[in-house]
Image (cartoon, rainbow, N blue to C red):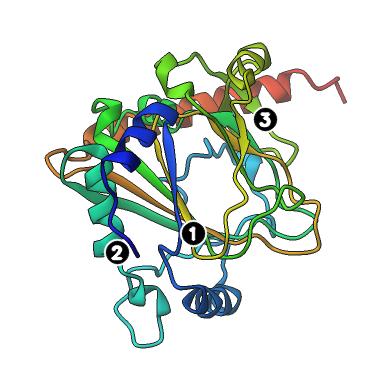
């Protein structure tokens, strides 16, 4: 795993992302995938997920979350990942010391893995309120645990989109009933011009670091193969999560949920 230099940093600032090969050894990826299959579970705490997760958004089989990534166990191969090296690279690109604040692994399941609507990660921070530090205090590392292809719904990035700053988002519901934030299609068309729409065909063990305001998304998985991926989200070492703001958000969300459900009930015809 080579160190990053000024040329990588310049490319990151210019494009809003940079690909790094072999952040995890491909043979370790095979071990990680086996572990995921044996320990996959949909019954985990999704409070920190980007999905807004209203009560009608429960789905099964399309996403798999692993909540034992940091479990110190000889049977947990995720402890073999060189997180220190990943953190070193994240800190270099961010220009400050960074700490991992959230890790997740999920399957983009064969034939049913859903699309990811195009968004900026930072918009979810602002929506939830617990991590509303400047966007430069965050960076994401997206790791391919298998070879990613267009047919399988690889990550797509709008190159240079971070230069637009924060972009307004709309609340939408996906085909699986999950509520998410996304950017207007007309804006996406503008961002994708000049060959800025970039499908990332990451090799197994490779990763992409990208800014929290870089626009990204993906298509659904129409292939017969799972496309397992891992995300490590970083926050500045000098910042802290605001638990009180998160509690306020959760309270507001519950009221919003009740209002939506009541509106649905009110719209039903009389019995």
Please identify, in this view, whether the residue under mark 2 or under mark 3 is nearer the observer: 2
Please identify, in this view, whether the residue under mark 3 or under mark 1 is nearer the observer: 1
Callout 1–callout 2 Cβ contact below 8 Å: no
Task: Classify mark 3: helix, strand or loop.
Answer: strand
Q: Residues within 10 Å of mark 2 (few under 14, many from 20)?
A: some
Q: Which residue is mark 2?
A: 83
26 sits left or right of 245 in the view: right
Query: Can you see residue 251?
Result: no
- Marker disc for residue 44: none
Question: Whole-percent x and y of residue 94?
Answer: 25, 38
Vertical order, 256 against 26 (above or below): above
Vertical order, 19 against 224 (above or below): above
Locate the N terminus by quadrant: bottom left
Residue 15, quarter of picture: top left
Residue 212, quarter of picture: top left
Q: Which residue is mark 3?
A: 173
Q: Residue at x 29, y 33 (%)?
A: 130
Query: Distance between the Cα atoms at labels 2 and 3?
Result: 34 Å
Question: Whole-percent x and y of residue 57?
Answer: 64, 41
């Amino acid at each position: 795993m080579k160190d990053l230099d000024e040329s990588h940093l310049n490319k990151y600032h210019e494009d809003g992302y940079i690909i790094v090969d072999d952040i995890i050894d491909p043979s370790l990826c095979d071990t990680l995938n086996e572990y995921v299959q044996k320990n996959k579970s949909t019954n985990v705490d999704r409070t920190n997920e980007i999905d807004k997760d209203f009560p009608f958004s429960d789905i099964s089989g399309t996403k798999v979350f692993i909540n034992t990534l940091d479990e110190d166990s000889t049977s947990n191969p995720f402890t073999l990942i060189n997180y220190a090296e990943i953190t070193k690279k994240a800190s270099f690109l961010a220009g400050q010391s960074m700490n991992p604040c959230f890790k997740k692994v999920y399957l983009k399941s064969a034939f049913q893995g859903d699309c990811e609507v195009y968004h900026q990660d930072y918009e979810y921070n602002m929506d939830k309120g617990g991590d509303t530090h400047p966007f430069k205090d965050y960076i994401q590392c997206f790791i391919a645990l298998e070879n990613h292809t267009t047919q399988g719904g690889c990550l797509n990035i709008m190159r240079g989109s971070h230069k637009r700053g924060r972009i307004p988002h709309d609340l939408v519901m996906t085909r699986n009933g999950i509520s998410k934030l996304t950017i207007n299609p007309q804006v996406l068309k503008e961002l994708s011009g000049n060959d800025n729409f970039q499908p990332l065909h990451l090799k197994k063990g490779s990763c992409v670091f990208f800014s929290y305001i870089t626009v990204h998304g993906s298509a659904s998985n129409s292939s017969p193969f799972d496309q397992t991926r891992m995300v490590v989200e970083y926050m500045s070492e000098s910042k802290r999560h605001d638990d009180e703001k998160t509690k306020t958000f959760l309270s507001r969300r519950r009221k919003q949920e009740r209002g939506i459900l009541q509106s649905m009930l009110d719209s039903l015809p009389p019995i």
